[in-house]
Image: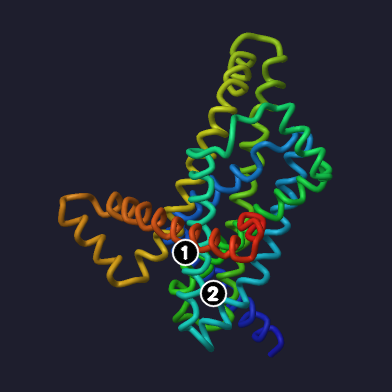
Amino acid sequence: MAGASLLTLLDDIATLLDDVAVLTKAAAKRTAGVLGDDLALNAQQVAGVRAHRELPVVWSVFKGSLVNKAILVPAALLISIFVPVLVVPLMMIGGAYLCYEGFEKVLHRLLPHGPKEDPEARAAAVLASGDTPEDMEKKKVKGAVRTDFILSAEIIVLSLPVVADRPMLTQVAALVAIALAVTFLVYGLVAGIVKMDDVGLWMSRLRGKLVPALGRGLVYVTPWMMKGLSIVGTVAMFLVGGGIFVHNIGVLHHLLEVMQGWGLPGFVADMLAGLVVGLVVGGLVFVAVSLAGRLRGGDSTEAVH
């Protein structure tokens, strides 16, 4: 009897693991676009950190991301079971925040405040603020973890429909597997990207011709890649945030059908609609936050960041 029970238990476990693998693969297809955005945004967030602190910062954000997932997975399951009507509004709040951050970055780039700041003046301003390098690093980590929370929430919510019709144990196991896989994948790649220049420098000092040449190529390409990821990351904020509104508001979703009627492929129409809506939402939130900051007599940017 005990042997039969053990075999039954092992069979149940094997079935559960098989279901989790299938559901994780299906969820990965649904969230592939968000994963790309997540990678670009997090690589951008780590940019500018001192070389010897890059991996510790990535590690800190990775741990923060795990905490985010530990909060989001049970919260998403509870909300989807008891108050499913809240799922979409919460996603839209997160999307609006992403659009706001993207709009703020674009505005800062296009309309710099005052004359161009030289490195010495910037260093003097940092010293005057009283922030130590450790304080600045902590702020960067907090910002990255905050952004990760929104993107992680979207990944978990997008994965919910995939597991919705399965038993509760399967749902929990699948969402945990998805959350862990996403976290390890994204931050493993981010760690590799931010250390590309160091790897290139090490390769350039080796003997031979081919390997050192490849190393010098990596050193040359890395700054351009980081700049490119910064641009992609900002665009991703609009695509993700705007896409949430486009796919959850009927009037905006109709915009996709209109654009497809112009002969645009579905994915192109989806990206353009998300970008346009993301810019509009980001602008509206920026204006609202700025007005609220002025009414309080404070700095609206500090109020959010």
Identify the amino acid type marked 1: Ala
Q: Nearer the viewer, residue 91 or 287?
A: 287
Query: Which one is nearer the viewer's eye here, 280 or 210?
Result: 280
The relative height of residue 1 versus residue 49 in the rendered view (above or below) is below
Nearest to N terminus: mark 1 or mark 2: 2
Depth check: give the residue in front, 294 or 18.
294
Q: Tell whether 277 sits left or right of 286.
A: left
- Residue 293 in the figure: left or right of residue 92: right
Picture layout, residue 241 above or below residue 120: below
Residue at figure coordinates x 73%, y 51% from the top left: 139
Residue at 68% in and 33% down = 195
**Residue pointed to by mark 1:** 27
Image coordinates of residue 301 in percent, x first then y, are 62, 54
Residue position marked by numbered label 2 in the rendering: 15
Tell me the colour scheme of the image: rainbow
Label 2 sits on what residue type? Answer: Thr
The answer to which image quadrant residue 258 occupies is bottom left
Residue 16 image point, x, y percent: 56, 74
Q: CA distance from mark 1 to mark 2?
A: 18 Å
